[in-house]
Amino acid sequence: MGTYLDTILADHRAEAASDQRALDQLIEEANAQPATRGFANGLVDGAARGIAVIAEVKRRSPSKGDLFAGLDPVTLAQQYAAGGASAMSVLTDAHYFGGSADDLRAARNACELPVIRKDFTIAGADVCDARIMGADAVLLIAAALDDAELADFHALATELGLDALVEIHDEAELERAHAVNATVIGVNQRDLVTFEVDTDRARRMAPLIGDGAVRIAESGVRGPEDAKVLAEAGFAAVLVGESLVTSGDPTEAVKALITAPNT
């Protein structure tokens, strides 16, 4: 039986294989877009207030189903901005997460926050599409890519003016992130094979990343106590989805995360 990741990647790779668009033309279109907002710089600035929050627009997950299926990305983006979020993450995978490029455009247009496209990037066209749809950063999951793909997509993102968040889970993947000179590195506390959360993973990996990259902790951040622990471990930012979209008051939930390290 395949894992969640196997199934999702197989679907995305099949879709990419059927994409007949010319990469050169996509690169030209991507380079013609307006300047990006500076995802990494926004996180560095946000960390000065306590810990930067990347607030996620997330409708559902493969493991839990609907989280907030009827969410309005415009309203949610404005609530996140009012709470002091440093950036947003927007799911664009339709089948497994209920997201879309329209969600990303709507959220980004509703405020001034930089946005990362949260999806399974497995082709150069995906990097270009992120830039074309208005993203300021793209996600590169080390576990989903071989060495050549990781290097190529990281270089392409840089060429297009995108920040690239290289997501890792362990020491071997961290070595690969360092090999492509990643300047933004995220530690996903959720195992992409089982989807279980290991809350000690990020704390173990933080000192190994070093100070040469913006450090982000992803998944399993349930509230201010977790944010405080992660800030103390050396993370500049936390990427938070489920606990925010289900909080009932995203603005106050973001505020509580940001100030947690100062309490």
Image: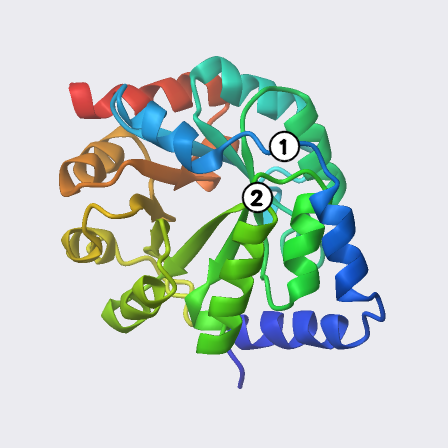
Q: Residue at x 81, y 70 (%)?
A: 19
> On the picture, is 216 further left or further right than 20?
left
The numbered dot on residue 167 is: none
Q: Residue at x 26, y 22 (%)?
A: 48
Residue with the mark numbered 2 = 161
> On the picture, is 54 further left or further right than 52?
right
Location of residue 7 by image quarter: bottom right
Residue with the mark numbered 1 = 35
Q: Residue at x 35, y 59 (%)?
A: 181
Q: Residue furthest right?
A: 20
Location of residue 116 by image quarter: top right
Q: Quadrant of the C terminus?
A: top left
Secondary structure found at label 1: loop
Residue 170 shows in the view: yes
Type of amino acid under label 2: Gly
> On the picture, is 249 further left or further right than 262?
right
Residue 72 placement (x, y as % from top left): 69, 28
Type of amino acid under label 1: Ala
Location of residue 225 by image quarter: top left
Q: Of the two numbered discs 1 and 2 on the same chain, state the one appearing first in sequence.
A: 1
Residue 221 placement (x, y as % from top left): 33, 41
Within-10-Å neighbours for mark 1: few <14, some 14–19, many 20+: few
Number of labels in the image equals 2
Looking at the picture, tell me which residue is in the foreground, 145 or 5: 145
Looking at the picture, tell me which residue is in the foreground, 81 or 246: 81
Looking at the picture, tell me which residue is in the foreground, 250 or 27: 27
Residue 140 placement (x, y as % from top left): 49, 59
Within-10-Å neighbours for mark 2: few <14, some 14–19, many 20+: some
Q: Are marks 1 and 2 in contact (CB under 8 Å)?
A: yes
Secondary structure found at label 2: loop
Residue 256 placement (x, y as % from top left): 32, 20
Residue 73 shows in the view: no
